[in-house]
Image: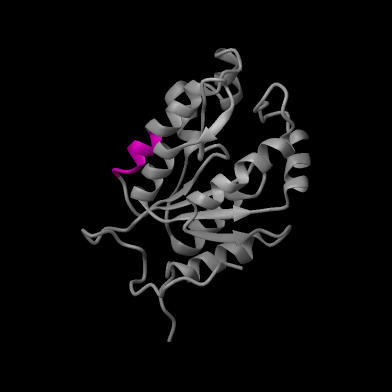
């Protein structure tokens, strides 16, 4: 369940100029960000933008193809994630389906590090919601999907997810655990949380 937060007094989160604020969905591979985003879009009548899809549009390549074109180096991809977040910052009233690595960059040794720049940009865009899931189940699900490129030459998916967990926690304004088969319930809970539906009498 979503942790208790201060009451929201408008129907939809708004910035100081009164425009609708984006809601960023973050979380590990396979947790259901895209699925929850689509369901929330239907409920809230808000469009969804995917950072992965925007990178693919910019490059004309799938994520796997783009990373392969750079010899498996994720740095150019992480830079493009930052770039597309900048574009999204100029919009409002969006549900943003963020890629699993939106909270990371690459250090000098090639290992993942916490991305201050991307998290700072997300927070400027709008509230950040961490969709949590069982790491072992998500790692197995990701490993079985050939469309998902390897994140590290020597680290397992579980090791990568465990390493990222505190970074998701640090980045998040709100947290919700996504139980298997409960994505519709999560979308409905988020709609209520952020007052994204018209009030009922």
Compare residues 132 and 36 and report the one nearer the observer: 132
Residue closest to the far left:
17
> In the figure, residue 71 lies in which quadrant?
top right
Q: Quadrant of the C terminus?
A: bottom left
Is residue 11 on the magenta stretch?
no
What residue is drawn where x is 42% and y is 73%?
A: 6
Dominant SS in magenta: helix
What residue is drawn where x is 43% and y is 60%?
A: 45
Residue 91 picture location, percent across and down: 31, 46
Relative to 161, residue 130 above or below: below
Residue 93 picture location, percent across and down: 36, 55
Residue 79 lies left or right of residue 138; in this view the side is: left
Q: Which residues are magenta?
A: 84-90
What residue is drawn where x is 57% and y is 21%?
A: 110
Compare residues 89 and 197 and report the one nearer the observer: 89
Q: Quadrant of the N terminus?
A: bottom right
Residue closest to the far front:
109
Residue 170 picture location, percent across and down: 51, 50
């Amino acid at each position: 369940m979503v942790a208790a937060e201060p009451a929201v007094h408008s129907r939809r989160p708004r910035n100081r100029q009164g425009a609708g604020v984006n809601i960023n969905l973050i979380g590990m591979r396979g947790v259901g960000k895209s699925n929850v985003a689509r369901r929330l879009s239907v409920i809230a009548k808000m469009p969804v933008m995917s950072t992965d899809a925007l990178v693919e549009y910019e490059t004309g390549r799938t994520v796997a193809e783009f990373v392969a074109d750079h010899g498996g180096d994720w740095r150019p991809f992480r830079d493009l994630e930052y770039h597309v977040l900048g574009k999204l910052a100029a919009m409002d009233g969006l549900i943003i389906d963020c890629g699993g690595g939106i909270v990371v960059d690459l250090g000098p040794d090639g290992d993942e590090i916490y991305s201050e720049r991307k998290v700072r940009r997300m927070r400027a865009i709008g509230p950040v919601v961490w969709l949590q899931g069982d790491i072992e189940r998500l790692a197995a699900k990701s490993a079985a999907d050939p469309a998902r490129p390897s994140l590290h030459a020597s680290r397992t998916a579980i090791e990568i997810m465990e390493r990222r967990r505190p970074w998701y926690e640090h980045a998040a304004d709100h947290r919700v655990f996504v139980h298997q088969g409960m994505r519709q319930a999560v979308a409905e809970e988020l709609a209520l949380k952020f007052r994204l539906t018209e009030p009922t009498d």
